[in-house]
Image: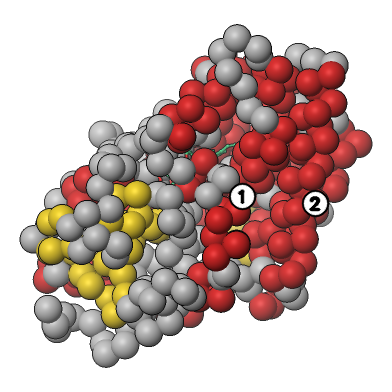
Amino acid sequence: MPCPALPEGFDFTDPDVYQSRVPLPEFAQLRQTAPVWWNAQPHGIAGFGDDGYWVVTRHQDVKEVSTKPDIFSANLNTSIIRFNASMTRDQIDVQKLIMLNMDPPEHTRVRQIVQRGFTPRSIRALEDALRDRAAQIVAEARRKDSGDFVTDVACELPLQAIAELIGIPQDDRARIFDWSNKMVAYDDPELAITEEVGVNAAMELISYAMNLAAARKECPAKDIVSRLVAAEHEGNLGSDEFGFFVLLLAVAGNETTRNAITHGMHAFLTHPDQWELYKRERPATAAEEIVRWATPVVSFQRTATQDTELGGAQIKKGQRVGIFYSSANNDPEVFDHPEVFDITRDPNPHLGFGGGGPHFCLGKSLAVLEINLIFNALADVTPGISLAGDPRRLRSAWLNGVKELQVHYG
Ligand code: HEM
């Protein structure tokens, strides 16, 4: 079906189309004219012969795909991004060891084990330590008068939160942070990190985590590693599975939260009424609106396991299906004035943490806690914070990222 709204050759997996504007105006056009749209793509995944992918733009359809893992599999690869074009079979097979790319029943087994580390009690147990960290991070940033909010503030808490949660010893944290940052940065040539450096960092992180798991099996401590690998009766993770889990956390819990915090700060500073309201009332609804507004993960992908119909489109077995959270979170059928940043929005059924299926974000409570803690600390800064430049966007087709945001304190 030709779509009158899109320019010829438009490609949602091209990082350059997101350089100046997310959400794309093209999403709004598709929601109205062709909500499940076949986007021909000449690049494809090497060895798979794909000639395009579906672009799912409406809130209801993104939810439907997310909640039907038997029809829309996560197993081939969940990222609908361009560097898939250069991926080999081996690289894709390795990705299947990450739970995000697993289907039930394998996914169910791993999820049941790892969610023991994410109970409300485990997250509450981190609160005091993370509150102190947040206060410390903000205090140090302020000492400089002005600087890059991303490196000074937004990067630090998510990494510390994951390290606290897993129980990474203090002395090892600098190395872990360095690997994590290298892994997520290599899509952007300006950051001068090659794909090889990114892949090596991932390998080093996996091997570090496997060694940590082996050590805790020998000698359990009071941390999540010990609980996940050493539990004998309820099933456990092998050391290699634990390595891939830590790898996923380093990406899933790091860049996402960092960008939610950065976009949140930018939104507050460009909507001073909302910042004043936040400082005065600290509404509990703010964190969810920050995540809706930021939508750090632009999209994920599934693969159809059978011929099926979605939103009036006929999807064929084996075709790739891109679910665009960034579009769903701006669907006017669900959100009144989605273009308005409103920290009192309630209800706020955004899909920033996923569409409610089996892969729904495992770290949501932790992310919400981090966002609350950091903005509480920032709201206490007097006389205030102001913008000192436009945000510089990360070059990425799946992450709504900011690599630099200059601010002034006081
Ligand atoms: C999965 C978003 C923070 C751990 C996901 C998914 C999204 C997402 C969209 C996929 C959902 C799906 O496919 O249905 C976010 C956002 C965050 C955030 C926007 C911050 C604002 C975190 C944190 C952690 C985390 C802090 C852990 C420390 C995970 C894991 C998965 C996941 C392990 C995979 C779950 C599975 O496959 O069962 N997240 N996330 N995330 N997230 Fe998050």
Which residue sits furthest bottom? 8
Seen at 75% across and 53% down, the residue is: 203
Amino acid carrying label 1: it is: Val
User: Are the two marked residues, 1 and 2, in contact with CB atoms closer than 8 angstroms?
Assistant: no
Q: Secondary structure at mark 1?
A: helix
Q: Is residue 326 above or below residue 108?
A: below
Q: Is residue 3 above or below residue 146?
A: below
Q: Is residue 156 above or below residue 394?
A: above
Q: Quadrant of the N terminus?
A: bottom left
Judging depth in this view, the residue of 288 and 224 nearest the camera is 224
Seen at 51% across and 70% down, the residue is: 84
Q: Is residue 40 above or below residue 130?
A: below
Which residue sits furthest left? 312
- The answer to whether one can see residue 127 in this image is no
What crowding class fits label 2: few (fewer than 14 Cα within 10 Å), some (14-19), or many (20 or more)?
Answer: some
Judging depth in this view, the residue of 295 and 230 nearest the camera is 230
Task: Report which residue position mark 2 lands on.
Answer: 204
Q: Position of residue 248 (x, y in %)?
A: 60, 45
* Left or right of residue 169: residue 40: left
Residue 236 position by quadrant: top right
Seen at 74% across and 70% down, the residue is: 196
Q: Position of residue 341 (x, y in %)?
A: 36, 51
Amino acid carrying label 2: it is: Glu
Task: Report which residue position mark 1 lands on.
Answer: 251
Q: Position of residue 263 (x, y in %)?
A: 51, 55
Q: Secondary structure at mark 2?
A: helix
Q: Position of residue 76 (x, y in %)?
A: 43, 56
What sort of colour scheme is used for the picture? secondary structure
